Amino acid sequence: MKLPDGKIAIMGGGSWATAIAKMVMSHEDETINWYMRRDDRIEDFKRLGHNPAYLTGVRFDVKRIGFSSDINKVVRESDILIFVTPSPYLKSHLKKLKTKLKDKFIITAIKGIVPDENLIVSEYFHKIYGVPEDQIAVLAGPCHAEEVALERLSYLTIGCANRDSAKYLAKKFANHFIKTSVSQDVPGIEFSSVLKNVYAIAAGICSGLKYGDNFQAVLMANAVQEMNRFIETVHPIERKIDDSVYLGDLLVTGYSNFSRNRVFGTMIGKGYSVKSAQVEMEMIAEGYYGTKCIKEINKHYHVNMPIVDAVYNILYERISPMIEIKLLTDSFR
């Protein structure tokens, strides 16, 4: 099997995309392509030497970056495509594609599900674009973009059906502030990445309602059990749910002030409407979309998921957060 090698492209212009570019370019011989939707952002990036909208403290040698707003040009000229666009916008970006993807190596760093399709991103690329499963990897773990920008020690897991490919890719991301490990549990990692955002919204709602640390600990303990029940049902393999890519990512997203899903939930708990919270944040809270997708997927599996159900009822059925969380507390132990 040919290992994933060649030119890397970053597909997306947000904070996580910027952090990933920083990781890759920490190797001095690495040059990349970078797809961004807006030409004005690209021009500002070239002029300033940093992303003008996200993680503005991270400096880049722009001579080592091939920027373009033409997705077909970037895909044509690249071998490894790292997708970091928000899941609600992935389909609209890919609709512009005339270049085939099945010969490319795809890495998804998107912690969401493709709306309407209700498919995890790896499955979407495999089913819709014909990319072989052993040419798809997932990048995940307890790793906030803001801390990568500050070069604080962080841990990433690269999941791929082909372990040799995962090991090869792990070396491309590892540096003095990023430690990497590998896994073959692509679906489990992706579903846990979606669920941890939903649980972070729940944690934020409870914070907004003035529940304290004692209850938050119980919420997280129940969340990891719920996560385990779901991924064991949809993809039953041997895994350790307390590994950092599952439990660690859940904890950092549920507790950190960098977590946009927790911030979004906190606003809901304080009485904001969904729409007003989204407008004020000016950033995508993936868990909002993930909640609906998981709820719909679970209609086929019937896993007991009281936390997901509670978040869904608050966000989509407009049930009072105070009432819904009180009902949830009665089911915990």
Image (tube, rainbow, N blue to C red):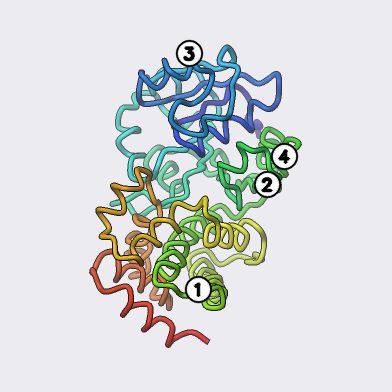
Measured Cα–Cα span from mark 4 to mark 1:
32 Å
The picture places residue 106, in percent across and down from the top left corner, at: 52, 36
Q: Residue at x 55, y 74 (%)?
A: 225
Placement of 14 over or under 210, stated as above or below: above
Measured Cα–Cα span from mark 1 to mark 3:
48 Å
Q: Secondary structure at mark 2?
A: strand
Query: In terms of sequence position, does the residue under pointer 2 or pointer 3 come before the other?
Result: 3
Few, some or many C-alpha atoms within 10 Å of disc 4 (few <14, some 14-19, many ≥20)? Answer: some
From the image, state whether disc 2 or disc 3 is nearer to you. Answer: 3
Circles 1 and 3, Cβ within 8 Å, touching? The answer is no
Which residue is denoted by mark 1 in the rendering?
Answer: 226
Placement of 191 over or under 167, stated as above or below: below
Describe residue 7's horizontal placement relative to residue 26 as left or right. left
Q: Secondary structure at mark 3?
A: helix
Query: For the residue marked with disc 3, what is the amino acid?
Result: Arg
Which residue is denoted by mark 2 in the rendering?
Answer: 154
Circles 4 and 2, Cβ within 8 Å, touching? The answer is yes
Query: For the residue marked with disc 1, what is the amino acid?
Result: Glu
Which is nearer the eye, 204 or 72?
204
Q: Residue at x 36, y 48 (%)?
A: 114
Query: For the residue marked with disc 4, what is the amino acid?
Result: Phe
Which residue is denoted by mark 3 in the rendering?
Answer: 47
Which residue is denoted by mark 4 in the rendering?
Answer: 177
Q: Secondary structure at mark 1?
A: helix
Query: For the residue marked with disc 2, what is the amino acid?
Result: Ser
